[in-house]
Amino acid sequence: MASSEKRLWRPRSLLQQVLTAFLLVMVPIGVLIHLASQSFSEISQLADISAREAVDQTRRARQLNNLATDMERSARQYAVLGDRSILDIYDDRQQRYRELLGDHAAFLGDTPLIDSLRRQLDALRPPAEDAVEGDSAGLSDQLARFQRFSEQTEQLADQTQQLVDARIDSIRARAERVSSRLWQTTLVLVSLSLLLILFFTWRIIRPIRQLEARIQSIGGEPESQYRKSIKGPLELVNLETRLDWLSQRLRELEEQKQQFLRHMSHELKTPLASIREGSGLLADGVVGELSQRQREIVLLIDDSGQELQTLIEQLLDYNLLQHNRRLNVSSFDVAGVIRDALAKHRLALEQKGISVVERRAPLYWQADRARTMRIIDNLVSNAVAYGADNGELYLSASADQQHLTVEVANTGTPIAAQDRAHLFEPFYQGASQRKGPLKGSGIGLSVAAESARAQHGNLALIDDPAQRCEVCFRLVLPWIDDASSGDNSSGDNIASSAMDTSQETLAGT
């Protein structure tokens, strides 16, 4: 059930949050597009104005030059011919020059050059007829004025070109300022968009990571570490509520499983003990001597009871391993552990005629002895159950500075390729048939693999390096430092002893 805090605080849905994030991220981008459009429009307008002014002023300056030249030509023609129609043409060109000069003054301003041209324009007249006929010096002086007028008109064209160039440079500088301002705005707005993207990404990823931690807590980590409620999109908050329900349901199922296993072990072991006790009394001849055939049946009942007890113990071991991850680290003799495991299956090995080759030389290692014993015991039990009658069983052990390697190999039917991937899964039973009156539970190898992983080791099915057997399991365990042990020197001596004896040969039983 959701907490009261969750009920009071209702975040937006995931869809609303994604849409809001998209809109907010698009706002700076939209502003940037708008500013860029305005800036490009401004630059384009400036360029258009600059081009038009340059063309107009350059054309006007060229027209003024042409008019000055035409006025001088008309004056010379009138001085030579004295035709009144030429004077009319001169007056038209002078008036046109005056108009263009006025327009040009609006662009350049009332500069001294324009004032000088205006004064000269008012003073310039074509030579009179009497000057044409008799006063050659006056004619030359009047024509020289036209020459000075043309020269100043050319100066006006040069000033116009310089001013046009200055205007173009000014517009270029302004365009550069607009471009620089646009780049700065782009940097700010894009950074803002990135910050918004990161913020909303964090808003979505944070509750997902909290849900991941919550799932990990359901998988076995301490529950109290992840009790902080999730604040985020409504769908993820609802998902946390469902996870809370699932966690509670899993705890209830786990309690039911524990209760079932406790009751099952009690209910099965009690009658099984009576059966084994009765079969033992019969085998001892307490109620009378048994015939050979009867003794075989009684022994078969006793062996089956022993196998059933082993299956029950494996179930309990599997359940214990699922909940007890603590290691009981100690120093022990690996060869002694192998002998103890073989002793538990001595009668079964003799009954099937399996010859055993084991390591007898001492090999000291530091790990969890009980778990290591459980691994080797399950591997030997597996070899007895599935190994060939009158076959062979090899147990070898070696060690280097970091790892202990134990190999258990037996003759018999090789494990099918399709079973190898599922070999260490609990309750999985492959194609190979178990030899004996009882069917296995399928958790022996799972218990062994779990015991190896609990010690940071590995249990794997390999090809027999010596090529003596069809089935070979290899156990690799690291040296485990016991943090609670205060005598480190003894551990060093044991490791040294393990190195000295790691390569000793095997002795047959």
Image (tube, rainbow, N blue to C red):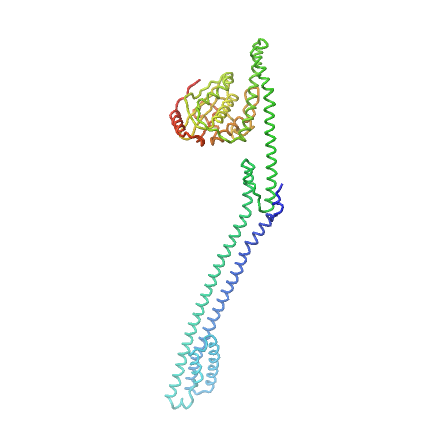
| Residue plotted at (45% across, 68% down) | 170
Q: Residue at x 51, y 26 (%)?
A: 415
Q: Residue furthest left?
A: 137
Q: Is residue 126 above or below residue 377?
A: below
Quarter occupied by the C terminus: top left
Residue displayed at 40% across by 78% down: 152
Looking at the figure, which quarter contains the N terminus? Answer: top right
Look at the image and tell me whether residue 418 can be seen. no
Residue 34 percent coordinates (x, y): 54, 60
Q: Is residue 353 above or below residue 428?
A: above
Q: Say how many tags the image has.
A: 0
Quarter assignment of residue 58: bottom left
Q: Is residue 446 left or right of residue 140?
A: right
| Left or right placement of residue 254 versus residue 86 in this view | right
Q: Position of residue 246 (x, y in %)?
A: 60, 37
Between 439 and 504, the residue placed more toward the observer is 504
Decide: is 339 above or below 284: below
Which one is nearer the viewer's eye here, 264 or 197? 264
235 vs 72: above or below: above
Which quadrant holds residue 281?
Answer: top right
Instruction: Return the residue nearer the eye: 309 or 296.
Output: 309
Which residue lies at the image location 42% right of the left edge and 19% below the top edge? 507
- Tell me if I can see residue 88 in this picture: yes
Q: Position of residue 467 (x, y in %)?
A: 44, 24
Horizontal and vertical percent position of residue 335: 44, 22
